[in-house]
Image (cartoon, grey):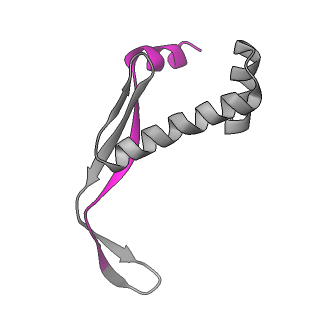
Amino acid sequence: MTKAEIVNEVAKATGIEKVTVQTVVEAAMESVKSSLIKGNPVYLRGFGSFIIKHRAQKAARNITKQTTMTIPAHDIPAFKPSKSFVAAVKTK
């Protein structure tokens, strides 16, 4: 499902204009992104959590050049679904 499809679904379900729904969806996504950039997780009860995961430094190999390189430690955004969300998908 794309962002445009989400906007269409919400507009259809609520009766609100698509332009308004698109603004709200984009603002919500921007809020989640800015919170994660600041290092703060976002918890949406019954849906899941947007969190930051830390990846430790590790060694990797470039097979074509037969060299070893070091990938530095870094943080990445991740999504952890709630238990009820996981259960709903399992019973599908």
> Does residue 15 appear to the left or right of 73 in the view shown?
right
**Quadrant of the image for the C terminus?**
top right
The span shown in magenta is 69-92
Give the residue drawn at x 51%, y 14%. 88
- Closest to the observer: 56 or 38? 38
Q: Position of residue 20 (x, y in %)?
A: 69, 29
Relative vertical location of residue 57 with respect to residue 14 in this rendering, above or below: below
Q: Nearer the viewer, residue 5 or 64?
A: 5
Quadrant hosting residue 35 = top left
- Measured from the top left, where is residue 45 in percent x and y? 39, 18
Q: Is residue 67 visible?
A: yes
Q: Which residue is drawn at 27% across and 69% down?
A: 72
- The verdict on residue 77 being magenta is yes
- Between 73 and 89, the residue placed more toward the observer is 73
Q: In this view, does 3 lie above or below 34?
A: above
Image quarter of residue 62 = bottom left
Give the residue drawn at x 36%, y 75%: 61
| Vertical arrangement, residue 35 with respect to residue 72, above or below | above
Q: Can residue 6 be seen in this view?
A: no
Residue 78: say if magenta. Answer: yes
Locate residue 3, reporting x and y percent: 67, 37
Residue at image position (75%, 29%) is 18
Count of numbered badges drawn on the protein: 0
Residue 60 to residue 39: above or below: below
The answer to whether 32 appears left or right of 19 in the picture is left
Where's the N terminus, which quadrant?
A: top right
